[in-house]
């Protein structure tokens, strides 16, 4: 890696570190926070569904910002929007607000995240190409996942401990502070290179153009289309599992106020992200096709979730959680590299945002349904149902594999299958 590419990588890792740290302060206690505010399981996961609905609603318009005004502008808008919406969440908790208010602010949180989705990854890939980097994307994206895991580990543990020592609202205020600090960091370090924004004075026309480009380069491209169609099931189940494990582990532990234990769930996921990010290029080197990794990950993840649904022993649940998160984490950079290698630079942020939209759409439907299953049958049964739901992604991944896209075998060592 040359000097210019190394600098780009450092900036990317810095942005990833700060953003993940800010976000993860609440990841370990978010469900408990919503339940403490007076929501039931259905309402809590419905609030999360409104968050993902916000991402679905705003992915395309914010794609216009990323591709039309620049990835840097999109990132800066994301930090400000997310900080403001997070503070509103804190106020709703203090006021024990009705569900409709949580739904509205959850949509605003989704808006904040859409400014990030696609933009940062597109900025990285284009800047690396401009700097002359010719290595595999899995290596850099894997390092990003490792840094994200370290930040998530620190933030989720700190969030749980701080909540237990103070109250459930303080981690949300910490998140606001770090996001504002990241605005300053990005304003100083992040500049668009290898990409020229194409601004349009007609906003609606630009949105239509972005949507058209998303469909043309995404859904109309068969190998990309099938990966996108698998995303609602894998992502929807993954989001539910992450948040459902907080009250589930407290239930197994036997202390509903042990918030640090709830933070442990997020911390375990964070630790496995570090290992998974390191493993990703090594796992990729063992097989000829990237889709082999994606299909195996879906099958193993589903099996682990079904097992989680049957265990009643706290430490066994922790081990299964760690294994599930490790399998998912190791496949993530492989999937990112696969999709990026199939799309052009000009539409990169657009297509990546549309891919995020597809994933978020699964969360809109899957989360409240599994939350309702938890209300009726309990958390263990809802996890097992989630595992079975995740299997729906496998036929789509097999269909993508059958397209024989060049990206499926890009960077593969000779002789592997």
Image (cartoon, helix red, strand yellow):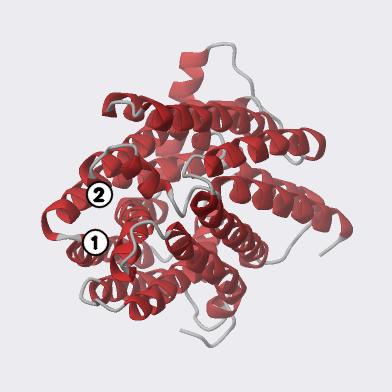
Q: Residues within 10 Å of mark 1 (few under 14, many from 20)?
A: many
Please give the name of the residue rendered at 71% of the width and 50% of the height, measured from the top-left corner: 12
Residue 154 or 273: which is nearer the viewer? 154
**Above/below status of 387 relative to 51:** below
Q: Position of residue 336 (x, y in %)?
A: 53, 58
Question: Would residue 220 be visible to someone looking at this image?
Answer: no
Residue 44 or 119: which is nearer the viewer? 44
Q: Are marks 2 and 1 in contact (CB under 8 Å)?
A: yes
Please give the name of the residue rendered at 60% of the width and 74% of the height, measured from the top-left corner: 281
Q: Position of residue 391 (x, y in %)?
A: 25, 66
Q: Indicate which disc residue 366 carries.
A: 2
Q: Does dot 2 land on a helix, a strand or a loop?
A: helix
* Drawn side of residue 334 relative to residue 36, left or right: right
Q: Residues within 10 Å of mark 2 (few under 14, many from 20)?
A: many
Question: Would residue 3 be visible to someone looking at this image?
Answer: yes
Q: Position of residue 179 (x, y in %)?
A: 64, 37
**Above/below status of 273 relative to 414:** above
Quarter containing the C terminus: bottom left
Q: Position of residue 309 (x, y in %)?
A: 22, 71
Q: Does dot 1 land on a helix, a strand or a loop?
A: helix
Quarter containing the N terminus: bottom right
Instruction: Find the residue positioned furthest to the top.
Output: 201
* Drawn side of residue 2 relative to residue 195, left or right: right
Q: Indicate which disc residue 58 carries.
A: none
Residue 40 or 164: which is nearer the viewer? 164
**Above/below status of 192 relative to 1:** above
* Drawn side of residue 146 relative to residue 398, left or right: right
Please give the name of the residue rendered at 24% of the width and 77% of the height, measured from the top-left corner: 311
Q: Indicate which disc residue 386 carries.
A: 1
Quarter residue 189 falls in: top right
Instruction: Find the residue positioned furthest to the left.
Output: 376
């Amino acid at each position: 890696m040359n000097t210019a590419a190394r600098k780009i990588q450092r900036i990317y890792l810095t942005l990833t570190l700060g953003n993940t740290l800010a976000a993860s302060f609440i990841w370990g206690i978010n469900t408990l926070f919503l339940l403490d505010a007076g929501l039931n399981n259905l309402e809590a996961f419905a609030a999360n569904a409104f968050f993902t609905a916000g991402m679905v609603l705003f992915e395309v318009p914010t794609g216009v910002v990323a591709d039309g005004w620049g990835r840097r502008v999109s990132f800066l808008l994301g930090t400000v929007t997310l900080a403001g919406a997070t503070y509103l969440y804190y106020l709703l908790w203090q006021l024990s607000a009705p569900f409709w208010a949580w739904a509205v602010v959850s949509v605003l949180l989704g808006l904040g995240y859409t400014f990030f989705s696609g933009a940062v990854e597109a900025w990285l890939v284009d800047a690396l190409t401009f700097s002359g980097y010719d290595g595999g994307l899995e290596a850099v994206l894997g390092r990003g996942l490792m840094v994200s895991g370290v930040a998530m580990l620190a933030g989720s543990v700190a969030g749980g401990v701080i909540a237990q020592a103070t109250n459930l609202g303080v981690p949300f205020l910490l998140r606001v502070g770090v996001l504002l600090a990241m605005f300053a960091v990005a304003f100083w370090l992040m500049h668009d290179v290898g990409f020229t924004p194409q601004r349009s004075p007609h906003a609606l026309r630009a949105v239509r153009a972005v949507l058209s480009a998303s469909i043309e380069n995404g859904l109309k491209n068969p190998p990309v289309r099938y990966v996108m169609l698998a995303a609602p099931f894998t992502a929807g189940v993954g989001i539910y599992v992450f948040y459902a494990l907080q009250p589930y582990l407290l239930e197994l532990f036997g202390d509903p106020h042990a918030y640090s234990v709830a933070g442990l769930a997020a911390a375990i996921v964070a630790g496995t992200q570090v290992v998974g990010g390191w493993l990703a290029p090594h796992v990729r080197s063992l097989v000829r096709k990237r889709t082999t990794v994606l299909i195996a990950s879906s099958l193993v993840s589903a099996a682990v979730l079904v097992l989680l649904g049957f265990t009643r022993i706290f430490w066994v649940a922790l081990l299964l959680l760690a294994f599930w998160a490790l399998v998912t984490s190791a496949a993530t950079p492989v999937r990112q590299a696969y999709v990026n290698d199939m799309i052009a630079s000009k539409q990169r942020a657009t297509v990546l945002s549309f891919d995020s939209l597809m994933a978020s759409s699964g969360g809109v439907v899957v989360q409240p349904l599994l939350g309702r299953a938890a209300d009726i049958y309990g958390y263990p049964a809802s996890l097992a149902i989630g595992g079975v739901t995740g299997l729906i992604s496998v036929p789509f991944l097999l269909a993508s594999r059958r397209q024989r896209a060049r990206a499926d075998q890009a960077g593969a060592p000779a002789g592997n299958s």
